[in-house]
Amino acid sequence: MAKITFVQPGGASQTVEAREGDSIMQTALAHSIDGIFAECGGAMMCATCHCYIDDDRTGAASEGEQDMLECAEDEVRDTSRLSCQITVTEGLDGLIVHLPVPVE
Amino acid sequence: MIGQIVIVGAGQGGFQAAASLRQEGYDGRIILIGEEPEAPYQRPPLSKAYMKTGDAGQLALRPAAFYDTNAIELRKGTRVDAIDRRAQRIQIGDEDLAYDHLILATGTRNMRPPIAGLENTRDLRTLADAAALRDALARAERIGVIGGGFIGLEYAAVARAAGHHVTVAEAGARLMGRAVSSQMSDRFAQKHGEMGTDIRLASPVAAVTPDGMTLADGTQISADFVLLAAGVVPNVELALDAGLDVDNGIVVGNTLLTSDPSISVLGDCACFPDPATGRLVRLESVQAATDHARLIAKRLVTGDQSAYRAVPWFWSDQSDWKLQIAGLAEATDAAETLPDGTVLRLKGDQVTAVETVNNARAHMRTRKGMGQGSILTKEDFVSAQV
């Protein structure tokens, strides 16, 4: 188990116990975290699980992930990631995930 | 505000409609009815990741608690028998259920072509099908596949990678013939051939036995089991019996409403006007299901009568190739391959669809451009080539 904290754009945060082997996206869905839609189910087709993570432990985004991020609906930053592409491990305990401001 | 919305079909589109209604702020009753015993789950991975891993826990669209938290009354394992439009009620066995608005999300079922011995084939449509196929795969050496479309080829790629002998019999002249250009069909035929899969084109299957399949030309293909993946047909019977307009799907207008103002239709079973050309189309994709669902939810909650205009997109994972399609081409549209392998579908100078392999950048740029309403031309893509 690893504790992951999701922070909404307004500052509200929720810390959840994530199951190892799940992706951050699946963790968010399992805990009904707002802002992660994950339409394609983790197939790297939709960029609706976009989040911001400023933490070296998650490594770098792959080329394919970067290409998808480029077209995310929300504001793209240097820390942008697709949460479906990050697998939870014990080593990620304490990870903080910021969610984007929703685009209407 | 509408008091009670009933959604028939608890696949990805039906689920999305329920979720989007709540997101839009709808506070009436939502009843989501599905025939399968499971809560809504993702179907695309059944022929991809799930077939490799067997991990059904990864498929659920939301955890069980989601439905309680959002007051979505999920009725699994339930079949709707009829719609009484005048009374605005649906019939489930002996039970009557009223609706103020009805959303039909009945999806598709496997097409069963007139082939002798079809009862000897297996389906790959539901989680139960996929689980049974995984079990059979573990015991099989030789596998036959009827149909060289997305499901048949995705399955063939997984089975071949696991070391099985795989023969794909496609009745048409090329693979994925309804969906991609002939150039792309050829590339995939070559890819599967290089993997060691036996691809038989223009090879309708005449008969299936417990020992394999017989092609129309008499060729015997021995197989421990045969997968039927010859396409799907929309589930339109409920709508047809209720007197709604049906034409390769349940016909709706550009707000996805039927001729009955109390009934909307979404996803694989909807026959809707293509925003780009106005022609009636039916798309079998996650994209159409979810975009339809969001539009309908918004219309019902806010009264927004905007026409549907989402850009179609699609993907298929076959071995280490990810095929992506953005836009929607007609069969008669031209096809031109660019130096980087991107295939443009063209109506005159205008790009109607873009087919790529392992090129998310070109795919997403197309979706973005089309989504902004831009007319994309060949030049837009030629200038982007490096």
Image (spheres, rainbow, N blue to C red):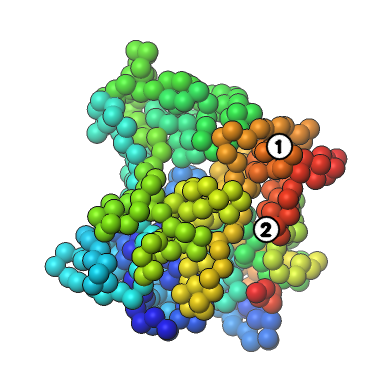
Q: How many marks?
A: 2
- Quarter-wise, where is residue A12 in the image? bottom right
Q: Is residue B35 left or right of residue B51?
A: left
Residue drawn at (17%, 70%) of the image: B95
Q: Is residue A29 above or below residue B285?
A: below
| Chain ID of residue with mark 2 | B
Badge 1 vs badge 2, beta-carbon distance below 8 Å: no
Quadrant containing the N terminus of chain B is: bottom left
Residue occupying image coordinates x 68% and y 86%: A11
Residue B152 at x, y = what percent? 45, 35
User: Residue at the spot x=27%, y=72% of the render?
Assistant: B88
Instruction: State the CA–CA distance, disc 1 to disc 2.
Output: 20 Å
**Which label is found at residue A84?**
none
B108, B139: nearer the viewer:
B108
Which-is-in-front pick, marks 1 and 2? 1
The kind of residue on which mark 1 rests is: Gly
Q: Within 10 Å of the Cα at label 1, are there few (<14), some (14-19), or many (20+) other Cα atoms?
A: few
**Both labels 1 and 2 in a single chain:** yes
Helix, strand or loop for disc 1:
loop
- Mark 2 Cα within 10 Å, few/some/many (few <14, many 20+)? some
Is any atom of residue B191 visible in this view?
A: no
Mark 2 highlights which residue? B371
Viewer can see residue B204? yes
Image coords of residue B327 (percent x, y): 62, 48
SS class, disc 2: helix
Residue holding disc 1: B348
